[in-house]
Image: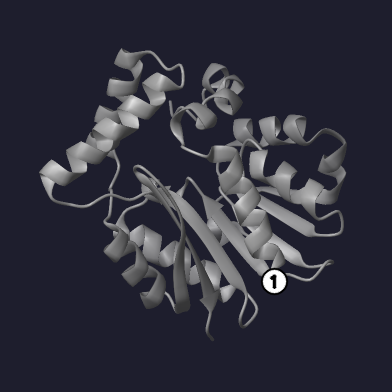
Amino acid sequence: MSSFSDPQSVANYAERPAKQVPGFHALQRMTALLLAETVPPDGHVLVLGAGGGLELKVFAEAQPEWNLVGVDPSAEMLKLASATLGPLASRIELHEGYIDTAPEGPFDGATCLLTLHFLTAEERLHTLTELRRRLKPGAPLIVAHHSVPQAEDQKMRWLNRYVAFAAASGVSPQDAKNAAAAINDRLPLLSPEQEVALLQEAGFGNVELFYAGFTFKGWIAYNLS
């Protein structure tokens, strides 16, 4: 059973990101601000990997007239999103599934936070291509996830920094080490250069790094079609 479908793990989800992702809450606020640069006050925004509802809540509170659509493959996480959103849930359309089951749009902007690192390069390219296809010309996509150099010594140096941050944030040192080992063994991690190349191959341009927190990186890119 995936941690995103296990009810107990899902129940504790909201506590974990801030202890593992440097500047987690600031990352969400920055994402909302970057979207607002081009998304109109009544714009439509697609949030892929929306389970838990944390960024949906930030976006909904920041922009009361945005039309938000959240997509996530985990029914349990979408239940948590509804609970997290509370009264805001009535403004947000939630869909269970992946990018291929997401509404066609076109959307004024899209986000995919802490999600793409679960996908292989081929799956990532497909997801990015389908995200771009659902965006209006010139619309932004904002992504953030694990991305580290591929040389083994460099990768391990950054993963050790991830462990140090998690431990300093209250995660038990052994749990932090176990998490880093799982990231290294199970996630198809890509380098920042590979991430940018995939965005460009999917049809995005003007790719800019806006966030870096140890193993995590974030980019904004625009649909050039």
| Amino acid type, label 1 | Asp
Give the x, y percent position of residue 141: 56, 66
Give the x, y percent position of residue 142: 54, 61
Give the x, y percent position of residue 122: 32, 62
Q: Is residue 96 visible?
A: no
Residue displayed at 44% across by 30% down: 20
Q: Nearer the viewer, residue 75 or 164?
A: 164
* Residue bearing the label numbered 1: 108
Q: Nearer the viewer, residue 24 or 129?
A: 24
Q: Judge from the rendering whether residue 217 lies leftward or rightward of residue 16; answer left or right.
A: left
Instruction: Work out which residue is located at the far bottom of the displayed protein and give it.
Output: 225
- The image quadrant of residue 215 is top left
- The image quadrant of residue 63 is bottom right
How many residues crowd around disc 1 within 10 Å: few (fewer than 14), some, or many (20 or more)?
A: many
Residue displayed at 43% across by 25% down: 1
- The image quadrant of residue 15 is top right
Asked which colour scheme the image uses, the reply is one colour
Secondary structure under the numbered disc 1 in the rendered image: loop
Q: Is residue 191 above or below residue 175?
A: below
Q: Is residue 181 above or below residue 115?
A: above
Q: Quadrant of the C terminus?
A: bottom right
Residue displayed at 50% across by 57% down: 143
Q: Judge from the rendering whether residue 201 lies leftward or rightward of residue 97; answer left or right.
A: left
Give the x, y percent position of residue 171: 42, 17
Residue displayed at 59% across by 44% down: 26
